[in-house]
Image (spheres, grey):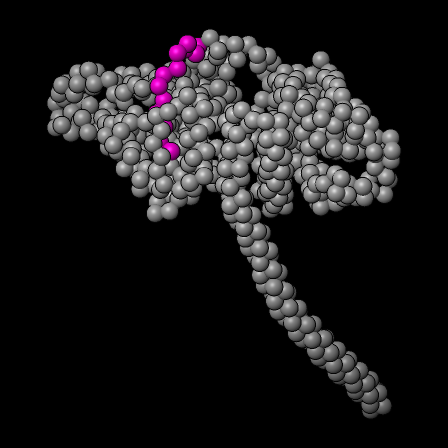
Amino acid sequence: MSNESGEIQRLRRTIEQLSDQMIRSKEQEERTLAEFSDMNNELVTLQRLLAKNNNSLEAARQQAVDAGDSKIAFIAGISHDFRTPLNGILGMAEMLKLSPLSEEQENSVSVIQDAAKLLLKLIQDLLDLSKLEAGQMRLELGEVDLQETINYIVRLLEPQVRKNGNQLSIDCDPRISTPLEGDPTRITQILINLIQNANKFTSEGTVRIRVALMKDDEITQMIRFEVEDTGIGISEEDQNQLFQPYVQTERGRSSEYGGTGLGLSICKSLVTLMEGQIGVDSQEGEGSTFWFELTLGKKDGNQSVASAQEHQGQDTDDEAPSVSVLLADDNVINRQLVMLQLKKLGITQVDAVVNGEEAIAAFLSKKYSLVLMDYMMPLMDGLEATRKIRSIEMDEMRHTTPIIAMTGNVMQGEKDKCMEAGMNDFIGKPFTLEILSKMIEKWQQSSEPTEVLNMSIVHEIAELNTDGDRTLLGMLLDMYRTETPGKIEVLRRHIVSGDHVAATEVAHDLKSGSLSLGIRYLSTLFARIEQFAKEGQSRKAEPLLDALLPAYQAACASLQRVSKE
Protein backbone atom coordinates (compact mmCIF):
# COMPACT_ATOMS: atom_id res chain seq x y z
CA MET A 1 0.00 0.00 0.00
CA SER A 2 2.79 2.33 0.84
CA ASN A 3 4.10 2.06 -2.66
CA GLU A 4 0.66 2.73 -4.08
CA SER A 5 0.22 5.68 -1.73
CA GLY A 6 3.53 7.16 -2.78
CA GLU A 7 2.64 6.76 -6.44
CA ILE A 8 -0.67 8.43 -5.86
CA GLN A 9 1.05 11.33 -4.13
CA ARG A 10 3.46 11.76 -7.07
CA LEU A 11 0.60 11.69 -9.54
CA ARG A 12 -1.28 14.27 -7.46
CA ARG A 13 1.74 16.57 -7.42
CA THR A 14 2.22 16.10 -11.15
CA ILE A 15 -1.43 16.93 -11.75
CA GLU A 16 -1.18 19.98 -9.50
CA GLN A 17 1.93 21.15 -11.34
CA LEU A 18 0.28 20.65 -14.71
CA SER A 19 -2.83 22.41 -13.49
CA ASP A 20 -0.73 25.28 -12.18
CA GLN A 21 1.12 25.52 -15.50
CA MET A 22 -2.15 25.47 -17.40
CA ILE A 23 -3.51 28.22 -15.20
CA ARG A 24 -0.40 30.34 -15.65
CA SER A 25 -0.46 29.62 -19.39
CA LYS A 26 -4.11 30.64 -19.51
CA GLU A 27 -3.34 33.85 -17.64
CA GLN A 28 -0.41 34.56 -19.99
CA GLU A 29 -2.65 33.93 -22.97
CA GLU A 30 -5.27 36.29 -21.59
CA ARG A 31 -2.63 38.96 -20.95
CA THR A 32 -1.25 38.49 -24.49
CA LEU A 33 -4.74 38.74 -25.94
CA ALA A 34 -5.38 41.87 -23.91
CA GLU A 35 -2.10 43.42 -25.08
CA PHE A 36 -2.89 42.45 -28.69
CA SER A 37 -6.33 43.98 -28.34
CA ASP A 38 -4.82 47.18 -27.02
CA MET A 39 -2.28 47.22 -29.84
CA ASN A 40 -5.03 46.58 -32.39
CA ASN A 41 -7.07 49.44 -30.98
CA GLU A 42 -4.06 51.70 -31.16
CA LEU A 43 -3.44 50.56 -34.76
CA VAL A 44 -7.04 51.30 -35.72
CA THR A 45 -6.75 54.71 -34.07
CA LEU A 46 -3.49 55.39 -35.93
CA GLN A 47 -5.07 54.31 -39.20
CA ARG A 48 -7.95 56.70 -38.64
CA LEU A 49 -5.54 59.51 -37.79
CA LEU A 50 -3.43 58.66 -40.86
CA ALA A 51 -6.50 58.66 -43.10
CA LYS A 52 -7.57 61.97 -41.62
CA ASN A 53 -4.09 63.42 -42.11
CA ASN A 54 -3.97 62.09 -45.68
CA ASN A 55 -7.29 63.77 -46.40
CA SER A 56 -5.99 66.98 -44.87
CA LEU A 57 -2.76 66.75 -46.86
CA GLU A 58 -4.65 66.04 -50.08
CA ALA A 59 -6.95 68.96 -49.40
CA ALA A 60 -3.94 71.17 -48.69
CA ARG A 61 -2.17 69.91 -51.83
CA GLN A 62 -5.25 70.55 -53.96
CA GLN A 63 -5.64 73.96 -52.36
CA ALA A 64 -2.02 74.74 -53.23
CA VAL A 65 -2.53 73.51 -56.80
CA ASP A 66 -5.71 75.58 -57.13
CA ALA A 67 -3.93 78.59 -55.67
CA GLY A 68 -1.05 78.10 -58.11
CA ASP A 69 -3.42 77.77 -61.05
CA SER A 70 -5.34 80.82 -59.88
CA LYS A 71 -2.10 82.75 -59.56
CA ILE A 72 -1.04 81.76 -63.08
CA ALA A 73 -4.47 82.63 -64.48
CA PHE A 74 -4.49 85.96 -62.62
CA ILE A 75 -1.01 86.95 -63.80
CA ALA A 76 -1.83 85.82 -67.36
CA GLY A 77 -4.93 88.00 -67.30
CA ILE A 78 -3.03 90.94 -65.87
CA SER A 79 -0.34 90.37 -68.49
CA HIS A 80 -2.94 90.58 -71.26
CA ASP A 81 -4.55 93.69 -69.78
CA PHE A 82 -1.16 95.42 -69.44
CA ARG A 83 0.22 94.37 -72.79
CA THR A 84 -2.74 95.69 -74.77
CA PRO A 85 -2.26 99.37 -73.81
CA LEU A 86 1.52 98.90 -73.82
CA ASN A 87 1.27 97.77 -77.42
CA GLY A 88 -0.39 101.09 -78.23
CA ILE A 89 2.17 103.12 -76.27
CA LEU A 90 5.26 101.43 -77.71
CA GLY A 91 3.83 101.19 -81.22
CA MET A 92 2.74 104.80 -81.39
CA ALA A 93 6.06 105.92 -79.91
CA GLU A 94 7.87 103.93 -82.58
CA MET A 95 5.77 105.46 -85.34
CA LEU A 96 6.23 108.94 -83.85
CA LYS A 97 10.00 108.52 -83.77
CA LEU A 98 9.99 107.75 -87.49
CA SER A 99 8.48 111.17 -88.22
CA PRO A 100 10.38 114.52 -88.26
CA LEU A 101 10.95 115.64 -84.64
CA SER A 102 12.91 118.28 -82.81
CA GLU A 103 15.69 117.18 -80.47
CA GLU A 104 13.50 117.83 -77.43
CA GLN A 105 10.65 115.82 -78.92
CA GLU A 106 12.99 112.91 -79.75
CA ASN A 107 14.21 112.88 -76.15
CA SER A 108 10.63 112.85 -74.88
CA VAL A 109 9.74 109.93 -77.14
CA SER A 110 12.85 108.07 -75.97
CA VAL A 111 11.78 108.52 -72.34
CA ILE A 112 8.33 107.13 -73.19
CA GLN A 113 9.90 104.13 -74.93
CA ASP A 114 12.35 103.42 -72.09
CA ALA A 115 9.62 103.61 -69.45
CA ALA A 116 7.26 101.36 -71.44
CA LYS A 117 10.02 98.82 -72.10
CA LEU A 118 10.87 98.75 -68.38
CA LEU A 119 7.23 98.06 -67.54
CA LEU A 120 7.09 95.38 -70.23
CA LYS A 121 10.19 93.68 -68.78
CA LEU A 122 8.62 93.70 -65.32
CA ILE A 123 5.48 92.03 -66.71
CA GLN A 124 7.57 89.41 -68.52
CA ASP A 125 9.68 88.74 -65.41
CA LEU A 126 6.58 88.20 -63.28
CA LEU A 127 5.10 85.89 -65.90
CA ASP A 128 8.33 83.89 -66.21
CA LEU A 129 8.67 83.61 -62.43
CA SER A 130 5.09 82.37 -62.09
CA LYS A 131 5.58 79.75 -64.82
CA LEU A 132 8.83 78.58 -63.22
CA GLU A 133 7.27 78.32 -59.75
CA ALA A 134 4.31 76.38 -61.15
CA GLY A 135 6.56 74.05 -63.16
CA GLN A 136 4.93 75.21 -66.40
CA MET A 137 8.08 76.53 -68.06
CA ARG A 138 9.06 74.27 -70.97
CA LEU A 139 12.26 74.31 -72.99
CA GLU A 140 11.98 74.64 -76.76
CA LEU A 141 14.95 72.78 -78.23
CA GLY A 142 16.34 73.97 -81.52
CA GLU A 143 19.54 74.98 -83.28
CA VAL A 144 21.92 77.19 -81.30
CA ASP A 145 24.48 79.21 -83.24
CA LEU A 146 26.39 80.88 -80.43
CA GLN A 147 28.36 83.25 -82.63
CA GLU A 148 25.16 84.40 -84.28
CA THR A 149 23.47 84.70 -80.87
CA ILE A 150 26.31 86.86 -79.51
CA ASN A 151 26.27 89.05 -82.62
CA TYR A 152 22.51 89.58 -82.25
CA ILE A 153 22.87 90.50 -78.56
CA VAL A 154 25.69 92.94 -79.32
CA ARG A 155 23.62 94.67 -82.01
CA LEU A 156 20.73 94.90 -79.57
CA LEU A 157 22.60 96.10 -76.47
CA GLU A 158 25.61 98.03 -77.77
CA PRO A 159 23.70 101.36 -77.90
CA GLN A 160 22.78 100.95 -74.19
CA VAL A 161 26.37 100.03 -73.30
CA ARG A 162 27.84 103.01 -75.11
CA LYS A 163 25.24 105.29 -73.50
CA ASN A 164 26.81 104.41 -70.13
CA GLY A 165 30.25 105.20 -71.49
CA ASN A 166 31.24 101.52 -71.51
CA GLN A 167 33.13 99.43 -74.04
CA LEU A 168 31.80 96.01 -75.07
CA SER A 169 34.28 93.24 -75.93
CA ILE A 170 33.63 89.69 -77.15
CA ASP A 171 35.68 86.51 -77.01
CA CYS A 172 34.00 83.46 -78.57
CA ASP A 173 35.96 80.17 -78.65
CA PRO A 174 36.39 79.11 -82.33
CA ARG A 175 36.36 75.41 -81.32
CA ILE A 176 32.65 75.59 -80.46
CA SER A 177 30.54 73.61 -82.95
CA THR A 178 27.88 75.25 -85.11
CA PRO A 179 25.06 74.62 -84.72
CA LEU A 180 24.54 73.04 -81.30
CA GLU A 181 21.24 71.84 -79.87
CA GLY A 182 19.54 73.67 -77.00
CA ASP A 183 17.00 76.39 -76.27
CA PRO A 184 18.31 79.47 -78.13
CA THR A 185 15.60 81.76 -76.73
CA ARG A 186 16.39 81.01 -73.08
CA ILE A 187 20.16 81.21 -73.59
CA THR A 188 19.69 84.61 -75.22
CA GLN A 189 17.40 85.71 -72.37
CA ILE A 190 19.99 84.81 -69.74
CA LEU A 191 22.85 86.54 -71.55
CA ILE A 192 20.83 89.70 -72.16
CA ASN A 193 19.87 89.85 -68.48
CA LEU A 194 23.47 89.41 -67.28
CA ILE A 195 24.87 91.93 -69.79
CA GLN A 196 22.21 94.52 -68.91
CA ASN A 197 23.03 94.05 -65.21
CA ALA A 198 26.74 94.43 -65.90
CA ASN A 199 26.13 97.60 -67.88
CA LYS A 200 23.76 99.02 -65.26
CA PHE A 201 26.36 98.79 -62.49
CA THR A 202 29.30 99.95 -64.62
CA SER A 203 30.12 103.44 -65.84
CA GLU A 204 33.00 104.50 -68.10
CA GLY A 205 34.34 100.95 -67.97
CA THR A 206 34.25 97.63 -69.81
CA VAL A 207 31.77 94.79 -70.22
CA ARG A 208 33.36 91.58 -71.55
CA ILE A 209 31.50 88.57 -72.95
CA ARG A 210 33.44 85.30 -73.03
CA VAL A 211 32.14 82.01 -74.43
CA ALA A 212 34.55 79.13 -73.90
CA LEU A 213 34.59 75.40 -74.68
CA MET A 214 35.11 73.45 -71.44
CA LYS A 215 34.52 69.82 -72.51
CA ASP A 216 34.10 68.17 -75.89
CA ASP A 217 32.95 64.63 -76.72
CA GLU A 218 31.25 62.86 -79.61
CA ILE A 219 27.71 64.06 -78.85
CA THR A 220 27.96 67.11 -76.54
CA GLN A 221 29.98 70.20 -75.71
CA MET A 222 30.11 71.90 -72.32
CA ILE A 223 30.10 75.68 -72.79
CA ARG A 224 31.00 78.29 -70.17
CA PHE A 225 29.49 81.78 -70.57
CA GLU A 226 31.03 84.69 -68.67
CA VAL A 227 29.92 88.31 -68.40
CA GLU A 228 32.63 90.38 -66.71
CA ASP A 229 32.38 94.05 -65.79
CA THR A 230 34.58 96.67 -64.13
CA GLY A 231 31.72 98.12 -62.11
CA ILE A 232 30.88 98.58 -58.43
CA GLY A 233 31.20 94.91 -57.49
CA ILE A 234 29.24 92.96 -54.88
CA SER A 235 29.98 92.45 -51.20
CA GLU A 236 30.41 88.90 -49.87
CA GLU A 237 27.27 89.28 -47.75
CA ASP A 238 25.18 90.28 -50.78
CA GLN A 239 26.64 87.48 -52.91
CA ASN A 240 25.17 84.91 -50.51
CA GLN A 241 21.67 86.26 -51.18
CA LEU A 242 21.81 86.62 -54.96
CA PHE A 243 19.72 84.47 -57.32
CA GLN A 244 16.72 84.60 -54.97
CA PRO A 245 13.40 86.23 -56.03
CA TYR A 246 13.08 89.96 -55.22
CA VAL A 247 16.58 90.04 -53.64
CA GLN A 248 18.87 92.92 -54.64
CA THR A 249 22.22 94.10 -53.37
CA GLU A 250 22.25 97.00 -50.94
CA ARG A 251 23.46 99.42 -53.61
CA GLY A 252 21.23 97.81 -56.25
CA ARG A 253 18.15 98.76 -54.24
CA SER A 254 18.91 102.45 -54.61
CA SER A 255 16.80 104.53 -56.98
CA GLU A 256 19.95 105.23 -58.98
CA TYR A 257 19.88 101.72 -60.45
CA GLY A 258 16.26 100.55 -60.15
CA GLY A 259 15.11 97.04 -60.99
CA THR A 260 12.87 94.37 -59.48
CA GLY A 261 15.27 91.75 -58.14
CA LEU A 262 13.71 89.07 -60.36
CA GLY A 263 16.23 88.87 -63.19
CA LEU A 264 18.95 86.78 -61.51
CA SER A 265 16.39 84.47 -59.91
CA ILE A 266 14.88 83.77 -63.32
CA CYS A 267 18.36 83.24 -64.81
CA LYS A 268 19.17 80.64 -62.14
CA SER A 269 15.84 78.85 -62.65
CA LEU A 270 16.36 78.73 -66.42
CA VAL A 271 19.94 77.45 -66.08
CA THR A 272 18.73 74.80 -63.61
CA LEU A 273 15.95 73.84 -66.04
CA MET A 274 18.67 73.29 -68.66
CA GLU A 275 20.63 71.17 -66.12
CA GLY A 276 23.45 73.69 -65.87
CA GLN A 277 25.18 75.73 -63.17
CA ILE A 278 25.35 79.48 -62.52
CA GLY A 279 27.42 81.61 -60.16
CA VAL A 280 29.27 84.87 -59.53
CA ASP A 281 32.82 85.93 -58.65
CA SER A 282 33.12 89.47 -57.33
CA GLN A 283 34.84 91.84 -54.96
CA GLU A 284 33.25 95.06 -53.82
CA GLY A 285 34.62 97.99 -55.79
CA GLU A 286 36.47 95.75 -58.27
CA GLY A 287 33.80 94.51 -60.65
CA SER A 288 31.96 91.21 -61.06
CA THR A 289 31.96 88.13 -63.28
CA PHE A 290 28.67 86.29 -63.65
CA TRP A 291 28.99 82.87 -65.28
CA PHE A 292 26.92 79.87 -66.23
CA GLU A 293 27.78 76.50 -67.77
CA LEU A 294 25.57 74.40 -70.06
CA THR A 295 26.03 71.09 -71.82
CA LEU A 296 24.62 71.38 -75.35
CA GLY A 297 24.12 68.58 -77.86
CA LYS A 298 25.96 68.39 -81.16
CA LYS A 299 23.87 68.19 -84.31
CA ASP A 300 24.79 65.93 -87.20
CA GLY A 301 26.76 67.64 -89.95
CA ASN A 302 27.42 70.97 -88.23
CA GLN A 303 26.94 73.66 -90.84
CA SER A 304 26.90 77.41 -91.00
CA VAL A 305 23.48 79.03 -90.93
CA ALA A 306 24.69 81.73 -93.30
CA SER A 307 24.69 79.45 -96.38
CA ALA A 308 21.05 78.50 -95.73
CA GLN A 309 20.12 82.19 -95.48
CA GLU A 310 21.86 82.85 -98.82
CA HIS A 311 19.89 80.04 -100.47
CA GLN A 312 16.66 81.38 -99.05
CA GLY A 313 17.46 84.81 -100.36
CA GLN A 314 18.00 83.50 -103.89
CA ASP A 315 14.47 82.06 -104.01
CA THR A 316 12.65 85.31 -103.22
CA ASP A 317 10.92 87.21 -105.99
CA ASP A 318 12.08 90.69 -106.94
CA GLU A 319 8.56 92.08 -106.82
CA ALA A 320 6.40 91.45 -103.78
CA PRO A 321 2.78 90.59 -104.59
CA SER A 322 -0.04 92.83 -103.42
CA VAL A 323 -1.17 92.04 -99.88
CA SER A 324 -4.65 92.52 -98.46
CA VAL A 325 -5.19 92.20 -94.72
CA LEU A 326 -8.24 91.66 -92.53
CA LEU A 327 -7.60 93.17 -89.10
CA ALA A 328 -9.90 92.12 -86.23
CA ASP A 329 -9.34 93.90 -82.89
CA ASP A 330 -11.83 95.48 -80.49
CA ASN A 331 -9.29 97.95 -79.08
CA VAL A 332 -9.43 101.21 -81.04
CA ILE A 333 -5.84 102.17 -80.17
CA ASN A 334 -4.50 98.84 -81.35
CA ARG A 335 -6.50 99.02 -84.57
CA GLN A 336 -5.14 102.48 -85.36
CA LEU A 337 -1.61 101.40 -84.47
CA VAL A 338 -1.58 98.24 -86.59
CA MET A 339 -3.11 100.12 -89.53
CA LEU A 340 -0.33 102.70 -89.26
CA GLN A 341 2.29 99.95 -89.04
CA LEU A 342 0.84 98.18 -92.08
CA LYS A 343 0.80 101.46 -94.00
CA LYS A 344 4.46 101.97 -93.09
CA LEU A 345 5.14 98.53 -94.58
CA GLY A 346 3.40 99.58 -97.81
CA ILE A 347 0.22 97.60 -97.14
CA THR A 348 -2.79 99.81 -97.76
CA GLN A 349 -5.46 97.21 -98.52
CA VAL A 350 -6.64 96.79 -94.93
CA ASP A 351 -10.17 96.17 -93.64
CA ALA A 352 -10.58 96.64 -89.88
CA VAL A 353 -13.39 95.09 -87.79
CA VAL A 354 -14.10 95.08 -84.05
CA ASN A 355 -15.30 91.53 -83.30
CA GLY A 356 -15.42 87.97 -84.60
CA GLU A 357 -18.86 88.30 -86.19
CA GLU A 358 -17.71 91.26 -88.28
CA ALA A 359 -14.58 89.31 -89.21
CA ILE A 360 -16.73 86.43 -90.55
CA ALA A 361 -18.87 88.84 -92.57
CA ALA A 362 -15.80 90.53 -94.05
CA PHE A 363 -14.19 87.19 -94.88
CA LEU A 364 -17.35 86.08 -96.72
CA SER A 365 -17.36 89.24 -98.80
CA LYS A 366 -13.81 89.04 -100.25
CA LYS A 367 -10.50 87.18 -100.27
CA TYR A 368 -7.61 88.27 -98.04
CA SER A 369 -3.91 87.49 -98.13
CA LEU A 370 -3.72 87.46 -94.33
CA VAL A 371 -5.91 87.78 -91.25
CA LEU A 372 -4.64 89.45 -88.06
CA MET A 373 -7.02 88.19 -85.39
CA ASP A 374 -7.21 89.45 -81.80
CA TYR A 375 -7.64 86.62 -79.31
CA MET A 376 -10.17 88.27 -76.98
CA MET A 377 -13.09 90.18 -78.56
CA PRO A 378 -16.75 90.75 -77.65
CA LEU A 379 -19.69 88.85 -79.25
CA MET A 380 -17.35 86.30 -80.83
CA ASP A 381 -13.71 85.80 -79.86
CA GLY A 382 -10.82 85.13 -82.22
CA LEU A 383 -10.83 81.36 -81.65
CA GLU A 384 -14.48 80.89 -82.63
CA ALA A 385 -14.09 83.25 -85.60
CA THR A 386 -11.10 81.22 -86.81
CA ARG A 387 -13.04 77.94 -86.56
CA LYS A 388 -15.86 79.40 -88.64
CA ILE A 389 -13.42 80.77 -91.24
CA ARG A 390 -11.82 77.33 -91.59
CA SER A 391 -15.29 75.82 -92.04
CA ILE A 392 -16.12 78.39 -94.74
CA GLU A 393 -12.89 77.57 -96.59
CA MET A 394 -13.78 73.88 -96.61
CA ASP A 395 -17.36 74.47 -97.75
CA GLU A 396 -16.39 76.88 -100.53
CA MET A 397 -13.17 75.06 -101.56
CA ARG A 398 -11.17 78.20 -100.79
CA HIS A 399 -7.42 78.34 -100.42
CA THR A 400 -6.39 78.37 -96.74
CA THR A 401 -5.78 81.94 -95.58
CA PRO A 402 -3.03 82.46 -92.96
CA ILE A 403 -4.55 83.62 -89.66
CA ILE A 404 -2.20 85.22 -87.12
CA ALA A 405 -3.31 85.48 -83.50
CA MET A 406 -2.65 88.78 -81.70
CA THR A 407 -2.85 88.76 -77.91
CA GLY A 408 -1.25 90.05 -74.76
CA ASN A 409 -1.56 86.63 -73.11
CA VAL A 410 1.65 84.85 -74.10
CA MET A 411 1.24 81.70 -72.01
CA GLN A 412 2.03 78.48 -73.88
CA GLY A 413 -1.46 77.14 -73.17
CA GLU A 414 -3.00 80.08 -75.02
CA LYS A 415 -0.72 79.50 -77.99
CA ASP A 416 -1.84 75.87 -78.08
CA LYS A 417 -5.50 76.93 -78.09
CA CYS A 418 -4.83 79.21 -81.06
CA MET A 419 -3.19 76.42 -83.04
CA GLU A 420 -5.96 73.96 -82.18
CA ALA A 421 -8.56 76.45 -83.46
CA GLY A 422 -6.81 76.54 -86.83
CA MET A 423 -4.63 79.64 -86.53
CA ASN A 424 -1.25 79.50 -88.25
CA ASP A 425 0.93 81.61 -86.00
CA PHE A 426 1.05 83.78 -82.89
CA ILE A 427 2.28 87.32 -82.26
CA GLY A 428 2.40 88.64 -78.70
CA LYS A 429 1.55 92.22 -77.80
CA PRO A 430 3.31 94.54 -77.80
CA PHE A 431 5.04 93.93 -81.13
CA THR A 432 7.35 96.20 -83.08
CA LEU A 433 7.21 97.15 -86.74
CA GLU A 434 10.08 94.74 -87.41
CA ILE A 435 8.30 91.80 -85.76
CA LEU A 436 5.09 92.49 -87.69
CA SER A 437 7.03 92.82 -90.95
CA LYS A 438 8.78 89.46 -90.47
CA MET A 439 5.51 87.74 -89.59
CA ILE A 440 3.77 89.05 -92.71
CA GLU A 441 6.76 88.19 -94.89
CA LYS A 442 6.84 84.66 -93.47
CA TRP A 443 3.21 83.91 -94.21
CA GLN A 444 3.03 85.86 -97.43
CA GLN A 445 5.77 83.61 -98.84
CA SER A 446 4.11 80.42 -97.57
CA SER A 447 0.62 81.22 -98.89
CA GLU A 448 0.80 80.81 -102.64
CA PRO A 449 -2.51 81.55 -104.42
CA THR A 450 -2.90 78.00 -105.76
CA GLU A 451 -6.25 76.29 -105.96
CA VAL A 452 -7.26 73.41 -103.73
CA LEU A 453 -7.79 70.95 -106.61
CA ASN A 454 -6.58 70.42 -110.16
CA MET A 455 -10.06 70.02 -111.56
CA SER A 456 -8.94 68.56 -114.90
CA ILE A 457 -7.41 65.55 -113.13
CA VAL A 458 -10.36 65.27 -110.73
CA HIS A 459 -12.87 65.24 -113.63
CA GLU A 460 -10.86 62.55 -115.44
CA ILE A 461 -11.03 60.31 -112.38
CA ALA A 462 -14.69 61.12 -111.80
CA GLU A 463 -15.58 60.02 -115.34
CA LEU A 464 -14.10 56.55 -114.79
CA ASN A 465 -16.85 54.22 -113.58
CA THR A 466 -16.44 51.06 -111.51
CA ASP A 467 -18.43 47.86 -111.62
CA GLY A 468 -20.18 48.65 -108.34
CA ASP A 469 -22.44 51.46 -107.29
CA ARG A 470 -19.65 53.66 -105.96
CA THR A 471 -17.49 55.88 -108.15
CA LEU A 472 -13.76 55.36 -108.43
CA LEU A 473 -13.19 58.88 -107.05
CA GLY A 474 -15.16 58.04 -103.91
CA MET A 475 -13.20 54.83 -103.37
CA LEU A 476 -9.86 56.56 -103.84
CA LEU A 477 -10.92 59.35 -101.49
CA ASP A 478 -11.76 56.82 -98.76
CA MET A 479 -8.35 55.20 -99.15
CA TYR A 480 -6.69 58.63 -99.06
CA ARG A 481 -8.58 59.57 -95.88
CA THR A 482 -7.58 56.30 -94.22
CA GLU A 483 -3.85 56.68 -94.83
CA THR A 484 -3.05 60.40 -95.00
CA PRO A 485 -3.66 61.73 -91.43
CA GLY A 486 -1.35 59.11 -89.95
CA LYS A 487 1.33 59.83 -92.55
CA ILE A 488 1.08 63.58 -91.85
CA GLU A 489 1.67 62.92 -88.15
CA VAL A 490 4.69 60.72 -88.99
CA LEU A 491 6.02 63.50 -91.23
CA ARG A 492 5.58 66.03 -88.43
CA ARG A 493 7.61 63.86 -86.04
CA HIS A 494 10.44 63.40 -88.56
CA ILE A 495 10.59 67.14 -89.28
CA VAL A 496 10.62 68.13 -85.59
CA SER A 497 13.25 65.50 -84.73
CA GLY A 498 15.41 66.53 -87.70
CA ASP A 499 15.37 63.12 -89.41
CA HIS A 500 15.95 64.51 -92.92
CA VAL A 501 16.07 61.17 -94.77
CA ALA A 502 12.85 59.80 -93.29
CA ALA A 503 11.10 63.16 -93.74
CA THR A 504 12.09 63.23 -97.41
CA GLU A 505 10.63 59.77 -98.02
CA VAL A 506 7.33 60.45 -96.26
CA ALA A 507 6.88 63.89 -97.85
CA HIS A 508 7.54 62.41 -101.32
CA ASP A 509 4.99 59.65 -100.71
CA LEU A 510 2.36 62.14 -99.55
CA LYS A 511 3.09 64.46 -102.48
CA SER A 512 2.72 61.64 -105.02
CA GLY A 513 -0.51 60.36 -103.48
CA SER A 514 -1.99 63.86 -103.43
CA LEU A 515 -1.00 64.64 -107.02
CA SER A 516 -2.59 61.40 -108.28
CA LEU A 517 -5.94 62.58 -106.89
CA GLY A 518 -5.57 66.09 -108.30
CA ILE A 519 -4.99 67.68 -104.89
CA ARG A 520 -2.98 70.71 -105.97
CA TYR A 521 -2.35 73.04 -103.00
CA LEU A 522 -1.61 70.34 -100.43
CA SER A 523 0.79 68.60 -102.81
CA THR A 524 2.75 71.87 -103.19
CA LEU A 525 3.16 71.98 -99.39
CA PHE A 526 4.45 68.40 -99.37
CA ALA A 527 6.80 69.25 -102.26
CA ARG A 528 8.29 72.22 -100.38
CA ILE A 529 8.74 70.15 -97.23
CA GLU A 530 10.40 67.40 -99.30
CA GLN A 531 12.83 69.93 -100.80
CA PHE A 532 13.77 71.37 -97.41
CA ALA A 533 14.35 67.86 -96.03
CA LYS A 534 16.49 66.90 -99.04
CA GLU A 535 18.69 69.91 -98.36
CA GLY A 536 19.04 68.92 -94.69
CA GLN A 537 17.05 72.00 -93.64
CA SER A 538 14.05 70.37 -91.96
CA ARG A 539 13.79 73.25 -89.49
CA LYS A 540 12.71 75.52 -92.35
CA ALA A 541 9.79 73.21 -93.03
CA GLU A 542 8.34 73.58 -89.53
CA PRO A 543 6.23 76.71 -90.35
CA LEU A 544 4.54 74.70 -93.11
CA LEU A 545 3.41 71.92 -90.77
CA ASP A 546 0.53 73.93 -89.30
CA ALA A 547 -0.89 74.47 -92.81
CA LEU A 548 -1.04 70.73 -93.64
CA LEU A 549 -4.14 69.69 -91.71
CA PRO A 550 -6.36 72.61 -92.85
CA ALA A 551 -5.22 72.04 -96.44
CA TYR A 552 -5.90 68.29 -96.16
CA GLN A 553 -9.38 68.91 -94.73
CA ALA A 554 -10.19 71.42 -97.46
CA ALA A 555 -9.03 68.99 -100.17
CA CYS A 556 -11.08 66.10 -98.75
CA ALA A 557 -14.20 68.26 -98.46
CA SER A 558 -13.80 69.44 -102.04
CA LEU A 559 -13.27 65.92 -103.37
CA GLN A 560 -16.25 64.65 -101.38
CA ARG A 561 -18.43 67.32 -102.95
CA VAL A 562 -17.26 66.44 -106.48
CA SER A 563 -17.73 62.70 -105.91
CA LYS A 564 -21.41 63.25 -105.07
CA GLU A 565 -22.15 65.30 -108.17
Q: Position of residue 422 (x, y in %)?
A: 38, 34
Left or right: 263, with 105 as reference point: right
Report the magenta stretch's main SS.
Answer: loop
The residue sitting at 23% across, 23% down in the picture is 476
Q: Is residue 122 above or below residue 404?
A: below
Left or right: 536, with 156 as reference point: left
Q: Is residue 325 above or below residue 414?
A: above
The image quadrant of residue 351 is top left
The residue sitting at 79% across, 30% down in the picture is 202
Q: Is residue 439 above or below residue 332?
A: above
Magenta region, residue range: 315-327
Q: Position of residue 176 (x, y in %)?
A: 69, 16
Q: Position of residue 406 (x, y in %)?
A: 45, 36
The image quadrant of residue 510 is top left
Q: Position of residue 93 (x, y in %)?
A: 54, 32
Left or right: 512, with 266 as reference point: left
Question: Which of the pair 207/294 is nearer the observer?
Answer: 207
Question: Which of the pair 493/382 is nearer the observer?
Answer: 382
Indicate the quadrant containing the C terminus: top left, top right, bottom left or bottom right.
Answer: top left
Determine if residue 186 is in view.
no
Question: Which of the pair 84/386 is nearer the observer?
Answer: 84
Determine if residue 109 is in view.
yes
Answer whether residue 319 is magenta in the image: yes
Answer whether residue 209 is magenta in the image: no
Left or right: 439, with 12 as reference point: left
The residue sitting at 44% across, 29% down in the picture is 340
The image quadrant of residue 464 is top left
The residue sitting at 73% across, 18% down in the picture is 170
User: Across the whole image, how many numbered discs are drawn on residues?
Assistant: 0
